[in-house]
């Protein structure tokens, strides 16, 4: 009987401590990268995504952006590549990676009756990916 009581207390305390643990914060930048970039650039951002064999030009290793830019992470350049303002020959037409246009459509659908700054929304999406890329630099 005493063992049952102790087991019940231990199980109860385990449940209470599980509930009391703060929720792990989602890594929004990593999630966005995995959904929108990893298919070409790879989950590890080294240019080895699933589509690499279908591409005419292999995607670059995104973990060495800082190294190849003199030790400074090229934030503004990467923003322009992601949102489509800088055309990359390897990406072909501006259909990819025009995430800026896609995010603008998503925002317009979400903020139907609410005023919002479309450029700020698109930039925030790009910056979440850029934050992740900055954290995976070698």
Image: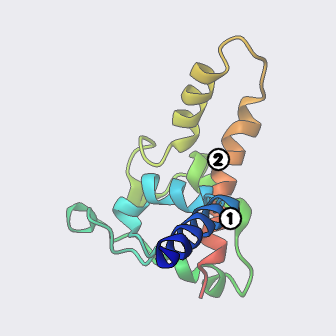
Can you see residue 79?
A: no
Q: Secondary structure at mark 2?
A: helix
Q: Going 53% across and 53% down the picture, which residue do you hit?
A: 32
Q: Going 43% across and 53% down the picture, which residue do you hit?
A: 35
Q: Is residue 25 left or right of residue 34?
A: right
Residue 101 disc label:
none
Crowding around mark 2 (Cα neighbors within 10 Å: few <14, some 14 to 19, many 20+) is: many
Residue 36 is situated, as x and y percent measured from the top left of the image, at: 45, 52
Tally the marks.
2
> Rounded to the nearest whole Å, what is the CA distance between mark 2 and mark 1?
29 Å
Crowding around mark 1 (Cα neighbors within 10 Å: few <14, some 14 to 19, many 20+) is: few
Nearer to us: label 2 or label 1: 1
Up-down: is 3 above or below 30?
Answer: below
Q: Residue furthest top?
A: 113
Front position in the image: 14 or 34? 14
Residue 51 is situated, as x and y percent measured from the top left of the image, at: 26, 62
Q: Going 61% across and 58% down the picture, which residue do you hit?
A: 26
Residue 119 is situated, as x and y percent measured from the top left of the image, at: 73, 36
Quarter of the rendering occupied by the C terminus: bottom right
According to the picture, the residue beneath numbered tag 1 turns out to be 21
Front position in the image: 90 or 103? 103
Q: Secondary structure at mark 1?
A: loop
Residue 67 is situated, as x and y percent measured from the top left of the image, at: 63, 87
Can you see residue 86?
A: yes
According to the picture, the residue beneath numbered tag 2 turns out to be 125
């Amino acid at each position: 009987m005493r063992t049952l009581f102790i087991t019940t207390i231990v199980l109860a305390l385990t449940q209470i401590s599980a509930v009391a643990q703060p929720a792990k914060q989602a890594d929004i930048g990593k999630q966005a990268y995995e959904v929108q970039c990893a298919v070409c650039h790879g989950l590890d951002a080294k240019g080895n995504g699933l589509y690499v064999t279908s591409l005419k030009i292999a995607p670059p290793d995104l973990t060495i952006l800082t190294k190849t830019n003199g030790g400074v992470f090229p934030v503004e350049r990467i923003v322009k590549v992601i949102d489509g303002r800088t055309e990359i020959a390897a990406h072909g037409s501006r259909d990819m990676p025009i995430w800026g246009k896609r995010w603008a459509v998503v925002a317009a659908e979400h903020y139907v009756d609410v005023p919002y700054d479309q450029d700020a929304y698109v930039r925030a999406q790009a910056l979440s990916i850029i934050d992740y890329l900055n954290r995976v630099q070698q």
